[in-house]
Amino acid sequence: MINQTSLDTLCASLCYAMGIDAPSSAAKPNPLLCDYIDKTLKDEKADRIFMYNPDAIAQWVYEKYSQIFEQITTQIDIEVPFCTVMPSVTPVCFGTMYTGVQPEIHGIQSYVKPVITIDTIFDALISSGKKPVIVSTANDSMSKIFLERKMDYFIYDTISEVNQKALELIKQDEYDFIAVYNGNYDTVMHKFGPESPEALDELRDNVTSFDMFCKEIAKCWKKHNSLLGFAMDHGCHEIDGGCGSHGLAMEEDLNIMHLYKTIKAKK
């Protein structure tokens, strides 16, 4: 069964969390996520959002290998199911995640990485006086499709450098919205398959990284209402030869499960 709620509802939900106007063309926010934010922040808004964006972790992988995720599922508060967009490839899906529109509107409809020219969540943040930042590996979609905004980008050769910079930014506590991209699971599952020992090791690294970020945020952002997300772009499936792929209109590629938690400010 394909999830009913489109990934295009996330952008406006994150804007709702921060109390800012979403891009005018964005889909309406996700009621499940917005209700959760209201309840846990007690009708206040988040002044910090941290989005951890691992690549290609399918809902079926999350459910089948739930024990790998126990390190973070004991901390997160809510699972939010989404149906990503077609074609279910990285630049198309992240384009929708952070614009709130379908691919035919944001303009990326295949595996290409042009700069998106319509309003994105980053434009909405900047217009509202917020300070967003993207931390990503070079030549990946998140390092390219949201360029040319008056914001900071930290682009590195390795995921280790990306994550170390993200920790540094958390400690500095200067940014209102941090998006961190890790593409390691996607890279390895393409070569060896989604359930290969090699890919599952990368999955464990993603879980450990998010756990590390959550703990650092709990220490460094005590004065802030914070929303933290473990938010992938699309799923994956095995193909002939034991390799992995994605991009099709099938449950394995379309269904994803985002994980969220809030941390209330200590006053």
Image: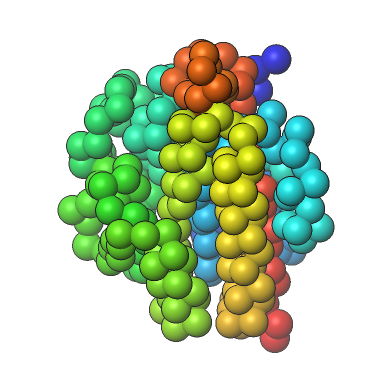
Q: In this view, does 56 lie to the left or right of 37?
A: left
- Residue at 36% across, 30% down: 92
Is residue 53 among what the camera can see? yes
Q: Is residue 7 left or right of residue 111?
A: right
Residue 44 at what x, y percent from top left? Answer: 65, 65
Quadrant of the frame with the C terminus:
bottom right
Quarter of the image for residue 72 reads bottom right
Up-down relation of residue 197 to residue 160 (above or below):
above
Closer to the camera in the image, 150 or 135:
135
Residue 209 at what x, y percent from top left? Answer: 58, 62
Is residue 85 among what the camera can see? no
Residue 139 at what x, y percent from top left? Answer: 26, 47
- Residue at 35% across, 35% down: 91
Quarter of the image for residue 251 reads top right
- Residue at 44% across, 83% down: 172
Total tally of numbered discs in the picture: 0
Closer to the camera in the image, 215 or 152:
215
The type of colouring in the image is rainbow
- Specify the farthest residue to the bottom: 267
Q: Is residue 122 left or right of residue 236?
A: left
Quadrant of the frame with the N terminus:
top right
- Residue at 59% across, 32% down: 194
Quarter of the image for residue 156 reads bottom left
Residue 128 at what x, y percent from top left? Answer: 36, 62
